[in-house]
Image: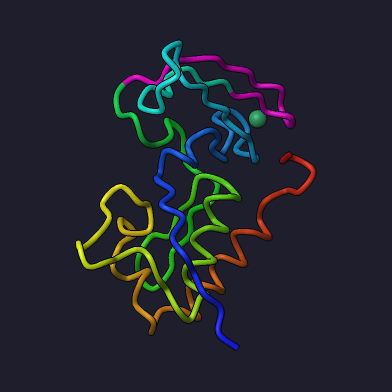
Amino acid sequence: MNSKFHDEGKSIYDFLHEFYIKCPQCGKFTVVKSFPNERGSFLFYKKRSLVCNNCGFVKVYRNSGGVIGSDYPLWLEVNCCGEKLWSYNLKHLEYIERFVSASIREGYCDEHGWKNNSMVSRLPKWIKERKNRDEILKCIKRMKDSIPKNEID
Ligand SMILES: [Zn+2]
């Protein structure tokens, strides 16, 4: 039985609506929600809000510089295969997992070469290497287990 991964052409922007982070005050699991700006463009996820259910830390802010990335340490980040495996949120993590676990990967590279906007085409090479597959899946499972299920939608 072969499982197939078909790249839906999702870009990293499709996963930017929320980040799991370590609360800057207590270090516990916290979700940052980010909102598209008034123009609704995905390029401008500037307004962000975080509410820590553990210590009550609340912050609404605009991210300063880079469009992509979190302003706080990500919750989902582990050492894996001597590299850093990270993810913004569960959907993002499951997307990576589907890609890594699929025995047939199609759609991310066609006769025109890499589809550069797709997130999968931008995954680092070590994630795509089959010899790392088992360890990556193990790490992904650990990351999933670290998400407090009552804290997410
Ligand atoms: Zn906190």
**Which residues fall within the magenta stretch?**
50-64
Nearest to the observer: residue 43 or residue 19: 43
Dividing the picture into quarters, in which one does residue 124 lie? bottom left
Nearest to the observer: residue 76 or residue 47: 47
User: Residue 18, how many percent across, how many down?
Assistant: 55, 35
Q: Residue at x 24, y 60 (%)?
A: 114
User: Residue 59, how many percent across, how many down?
Assistant: 57, 17
Q: Residue at x 64, y 59 (%)?
A: 144
Image quarter hosting the C terminus: top right
Membership of 29 in magenta stretch? no
Dividing the picture into quarters, in which one does residue 107 lie? bottom left
Looking at the image, residue 147 sits to the left or right of residue 42; the answer is right
Q: Residue at x 56, y 74 (%)?
A: 138
Q: Residue furthest bottom?
A: 1
Q: Residue furthest front?
A: 111
Q: Residue at x 76, y 48 (%)?
A: 149
Looking at the image, residue 84 sits to the left or right of residue 148; the answer is left
Membership of 60 in magenta stretch? yes
Image quarter hosting the N terminus: bottom right
Query: Vertically, is 86 above or below 132?
Result: above
Rendered image coloring scheme: rainbow
Query: Vertically, is 10 above or below 70?
Result: below
Q: Residue furthest top?
A: 38
* Location of ligand 1 given as a quarter of the image: top right
Q: Residue furthest right?
A: 150
